[in-house]
Amino acid sequence: MARIKFTKNELKRQKDSLTRFKRYLPTLMLKKQQLQMEIRKINQTLDEKAKAQENLKKNMDSWIAVFGEKIDFSQFLKVKDIQTDKGNIAGIEIPIFKNIELEILEYDLFKIPLWVDKALISLQQLLSLEAEIKILRTQKQLLNDELRLTSQRVNLFEKVKIPEAQNHIRTIKIYLGDQQTAAVVRGKISKNKIEKAS
């Protein structure tokens, strides 16, 4: 516990601190709620994207399995760029997925099976989903980190700073009250001594 001075100035300083803590606490609690809500939304979106990705993979497996050829698709499809934008949630800057730029490399239509065209379309969708999921996970991580810090601050104010300031104010008021009472008693004793002396 920090040492405090038992003065009126210290009492005012402690009251000002308490007022400030009580003013900041609702803002922090609101930020915490907003972060929790956004994390829930991201989790829901992540689940939807993961299901879409799984369905696309199952769909691809069903028709790729028909063809026994093993083909390396990296020779046909290349990720050029993943475009993101910047968003702001509760004062936290997060990346937002905009688009994925893919390049389909040229290939010999006579040597490559016909189903590769359909596979490339499905792969483009799959790569787009993977990029979006990666960005969503980054968002979630950034918001989780901020939520942890905000929760720590809320707990600090609720459980430490506000009770500490209230305790300091109570202690200073008791001390100042005792000093005032002692001064009155000393004044009365002095008055009585003066009256007896005269």
Image (spheres, rainbow, N blue to C red):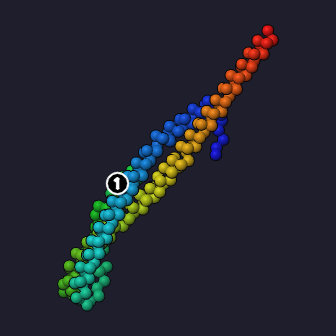
Image quarter hosting the C terminus: top right
Q: Which residue is mark 1?
A: 87
Identify whether 34 is placed above or below 174. Answer: below
Q: Identify the image quadrant of residue 165.
A: top right
For residue 182, side relative to residue 196 (left or right)? left
Q: Is residue 172 left or right of residue 53?
A: right
**Viewer-proximal residue, 147 or 82?**
147
- Residue at the spot 29% in from the left edge and 88% down from the top edge: 70
- Does any portion of residue 82 appear in the rendered image? no
Q: Amino acid at mark 1?
A: Gly
Q: Nearer the viewer, residue 182 or 116?
A: 182
Q: Residue at x 35, y 60 (%)?
A: 40
Residue at the location (37% across, 59% down)? 39
Q: On screen, 8 above or below 146?
A: above
Residue, far top: 198
Return the residue nearer the eye: 179 or 4.
179
Q: Position of residue 113 (x, y in %)?
A: 21, 86
Taking 161 as reference, is 108 left or right? left
142 over 104 or under it: above or below: above
